[in-house]
Image (cartoon, coloured by chain):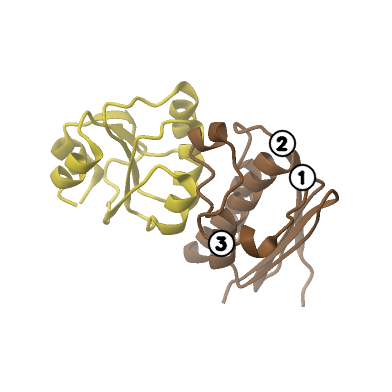
Chain colours: A brown, B yellow
């Protein structure tokens, strides 16, 4: 495997104005690299959902993105409350978002399912009281 | 259909239009952002009543052709400025979502 281009971002918690800026930056970079639009869309959606999750639920976090010629690997790490029941959290429509988050248009319970849907590899590791790490891979072929 | 034709069909006001000639293919209605992200096709018209800045992020990331704010809803200042800075097409109509879809001709 050839050397990766690495991008790193700090995602601010509870800030819905800056939310999405990391995804936007990754999208721009992939566009510049000439990656196909259908792959960019998958990456952008999956990463935005992950970013929003960190903003809403975890008080922010960190995104580490490695871009290879044939794929992209996105690791989202937070030190939030953790997810007690990952299987339940993965269910379409299940959400723990509050009413004010729903007023913003979030909290449909589709974030994690979308991340899984739009990626080729998807892994959540979470420990209650410690944090959550999500690893996603999208292949460009 | 091009965006300028859609504007005419909906008697819509243009908030910001980067490319009035852009082709709109089909549409999607929804206000829950994750549902829209999961289901709205690229290059479609997105009919919604949600008017905050996250709408711009979702529209940009999913690459919808145009956002149609229905029911007379106006974009808040952040959505308006983000639409301009990201280069999105954003229009508003007094029609309900249902009527807007019917009259759109999409």
Q: What chain does badge 3 belong to?
A: A
For label 3, the residue is A91
Do the numbered discs 3 and 1 sit on residues whose CB atoms are within 8 Å? Answer: no
Task: Report which quarter residue A119 is drawn in.
Answer: bottom right
For mark 1, give the secondary structure.
strand
Q: Earlier in the sequence, mark 3 or mark 2?
A: 2
Quadrant containing the C terminus of chain A in the rendered view: bottom right
Q: Earlier in the sequence, mark 3 or mark 1?
A: 1
Q: Earlier in the sequence, mark 1 or mark 2?
A: 2
- Residue appearing at x 61%, y 60% in the figure: A33
Percent coordinates x, y for residue B79 in the rendering: 46, 29
- Residue appearing at x 60%, y 31% in the figure: A17
Do the numbered discs 1 and 2 sit on residues whose CB atoms are within 8 Å? Answer: yes
Mark 2 is surrounded, within 10 Å at the Cα level, by few (under 14), some (14 to 19) or many (20 or more) other residues, namely: many
Quadrant containing the N terminus of chain A in the rendered view: bottom right
Percent coordinates x, y for residue A95 in the rendering: 57, 49
Mark 3 is surrounded, within 10 Å at the Cα level, by few (under 14), some (14 to 19) or many (20 or more) other residues, namely: some
Residue furthest top as drawn: B77
Identify the mark at residue A13; answer none if there is no mark.
Answer: 2
């Amino acid at each position: 495997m050839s050397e990766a281009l690495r991008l790193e971002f700090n995602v601010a918690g509870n800030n819905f104005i800056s939310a999405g800026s990391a995804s936007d930056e990754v999208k721009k970079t992939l566009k510049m690299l000439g990656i196909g639009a259908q792959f960019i869309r998958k990456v952008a959606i999956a990463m935005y959902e992950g970013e929003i999750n960190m903003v809403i639920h975890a008080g922010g976090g960190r995104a580490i993105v490695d871009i290879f010629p044939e794929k992209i690997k996105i690791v989202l790490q937070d030190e939030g409350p953790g997810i007690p029941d990952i299987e339940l959290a993965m269910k379409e429509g299940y959400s723990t978002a509050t009413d004010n988050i729903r007023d913003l248009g979030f909290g449909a319970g589709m974030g994690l399912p979308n991340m899984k849907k739009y990626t080729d590899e998807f892994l959540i590791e979470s420990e209650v009281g410690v944090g959550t790490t999500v690893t996603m891979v999208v292949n460009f072929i | 259909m091009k965006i300028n034709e859609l504007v005419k069909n909906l008697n819509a006001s243009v908030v910001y239009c980067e490319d009035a000639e852009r082709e709109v293919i089909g549409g999607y209605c929804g206000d829950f952002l994750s549902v829209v992200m999961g289901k709205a096709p690229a290059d479609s018209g997105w009919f919604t009543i949600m008017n905050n800045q996250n709408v711009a992020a979702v529209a940009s990331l999913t690459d919808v052709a145009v956002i149609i704010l229905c029911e007379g809803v106006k974009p808040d200042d952040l959505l308006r400025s983000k639409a301009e800075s990201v280069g999105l097409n954003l229009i508003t109509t007094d029609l309900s979502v249902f009527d807007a879809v019917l009259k759109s001709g999409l």
